[in-house]
Image: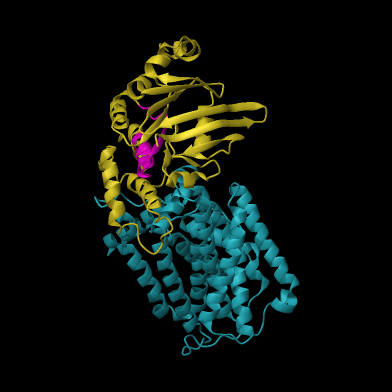
Chain colours: A cyan, B yellow
Amino acid sequence: MQASPPAGTGVCFSAARRWRMAETVFWLAAAATFFGLPGYHLLLTEIAIIGLFALSLDLILGFAGIASLGHAAFFGLGAYVAGLLGKHGWGDPLLGLAAGAGSAALLGFLTSFLVLRGSDLTRLVVTLGVALLLGEAANQAAWLTGGADGLQGVEIAPLLGRFEFDLFGRTAYAYCLVVTFVLFMVARQIVNSPFGLSVRAVRDNALRARAIGVPVNSRLVAIYTVAAAYAGIAGALLAQTTQFVSLDVLALHRSADVLLAVVIGGVGYLYGGLIGAVFLKVLQDVFAGLTPQYWTFWIGLVLVVLVLVGRERAVAGARDVVRRVVGIRRRTS
Amino acid sequence: MTVSLETRGLTKRFGGIVATDNVSFRLEVGARHALIGPNGAGKTTFINLLTGVLPPTAGQVFLEGTDVTRMTPERRVLRGLARTFQINQLFASMTPAETIGAAVSERLRRGSTWWRSLGGQREIEAEVETIAARFGLADALGTNVTRLAYGKQRLLEIAVAFACRPRVLLLDEPAAGVPEAERRELLDTVAALPRDVSVLLIEHDMDLVFSFAERISVLVNGALFAEGSVEEVSNDPRVRAVYLGEDEHG
């Protein structure tokens, strides 16, 4: 768990809304990758999408305390909806995003009632079950989804009628980055609002939340629906930027990966999912380059070490190492 | 209207056990009323029935003349029925400012507002500051609640309930576990609650009961055993036999 924001200074809630310098640095760095790393746009696009997906999971896991092993259900639905629209002549990217968000939100709303009750374990199983159901439905409905062959022939129109999606992923990356940024800002607003506070109250202590008049269930339904819409948009982005949708978007490993990203980056402060996505994807890319056959082994090892050592200690340790290295360089130069 | 909270024939059975047995109880407007009883007398169940955490097997609950028996706990809160807990139920990730702010914003029906930041809302901030001052928490508004001294946590426990601006306040053993040094402040704060709030105090601590309450009801085996002024109840030989006799010098 991320520590709560530091104490306010006189004014009651200033800590929550204050924009920190590190946040500006983070987003400037993200923007810089667009200009500075042109050869990596495909990987960066994927990172932005997984980051947005992880942000969505953080909204329910970090802020509402709902653990999910089936978040890919919403991601996959958004991907299929946007893909199908593109395939059948409705290739406008923003229309696809809206449709992906809307359909995933509807599914989120309907399934939220299943996660209202029960412990973390029941929630894990229920969410997993919903994703499995959807995965099998997509597999069986081959006439619609292409089944195991995937959805082919997805055509996406130029963004805003002007920017073609190019082979190098320039437009795609800019598009995904901007969408992720805008949705991040909206999420930030949500968690800093009275609504966000009440959702945190439910996470911390549902009994007390009820006792101060918070309608616990409807708040959980609301945040779950919003998070589902976010995941649907992430899925739609993937379908549009790869112009292809396969059953993989609904697979268990999607849900597991995004959970890993959030856990690695830390829950409950919104940046965790983004940082975790960067970490996970870069790690995958590096290991896959070093040892194409055994990269999952190394990823697994890093994850086990990370969890056993603890993220805070690992981060503090890395900071220490960096300081020492920088210190040595300064002394030698 | 002189009755703020009333139950009629309130009964709760868990299987074969009768936890609340046909209780008809009245809390007058502005009352300082204590509910006492030995362990296992059904005090907690009674509170849970009043607040709507548990549905009764039979009987009704009236809040200011309105039948609230089937109303959810959160609706009852918005109608002016708030409670504190015997064991602290606070929000572990929050500061007192956020904790009280959550209750205030919910009362102002802003709890589903997502497009405005909490920080910009002067109305909520001002009320948080007023309540914090009343409960001796002004200096601790920005400290995480888990780092507050236990006595301060108990004060916050009451402050949160008070932030719901209740007309009926149920205090469940407010002084439980508070060390001697912090006790005075807590008792004074409870004594200084405004008179237009009707208070039902559930308590083991007889000093607190006698210093605070004007009326006492005694619950034994889930049923209302005796009721009257402090004097009447403390002189009632039956009450002394089942309850006071054991605890008074204990």
The reply to whether residue A298 is in sight is: no
Q: State the count of labels.
A: 0
Image check: B56 left or right of B232?
right
Where residue A29 sits, quadrant-wise, is bottom left
Q: In this view, does A26 lie to the left or right of A227?
A: left
Q: Which residue lies furthest to the front in this view?
A: B1
The residue at the point 46 percent across, 90 percent down is: A162
Depth check: give the residue in front, B54 or B119.
B54
In the picture shown, does residue B1 fall above or below A306? above
**Of A214 and A177, which appears nearest the observer?**
A214
Left or right relative to B146: residue A124? right
Name of the residue lying farthest toward the bottom: A162
Q: Where is residue A317 in the image (x, y as percent from the top left)?
A: 40, 52
Q: Where on the picture, by quarter, is residue A23?
A: bottom left
Q: Is residue A99 visible?
A: yes
In the rendered image, residue B238, in percent from the top left (x then y), is placed at 49, 11
Q: Is residue B86 magenta?
A: no
Viewport quadrant of the C terminus of chain A: bottom left
The residue sitting at 60% across, 81% down in the picture is: A243
Give the answer, above or below, for where A235 lies relative to A92: above
Q: In this view, does A218 lie to the left or right of A13?
A: right
User: Which residues fall within the magenta stretch?
Assistant: B154-178
Q: Which of A315 and A150 is in front in this view?
A: A150
From this view, report whether residue A14 is shown above or below residue B148.
below
- Residue B160 is situated, as x and y percent measured from the top left of the image, at 37, 42
Is B170 magenta? The answer is: yes
Q: Residue at x 61, y 87 (%)?
A: A89
Name which residue lies at 50% across and 50% down. Answer: A216
Residue B3, position in %: x, y? 42, 34
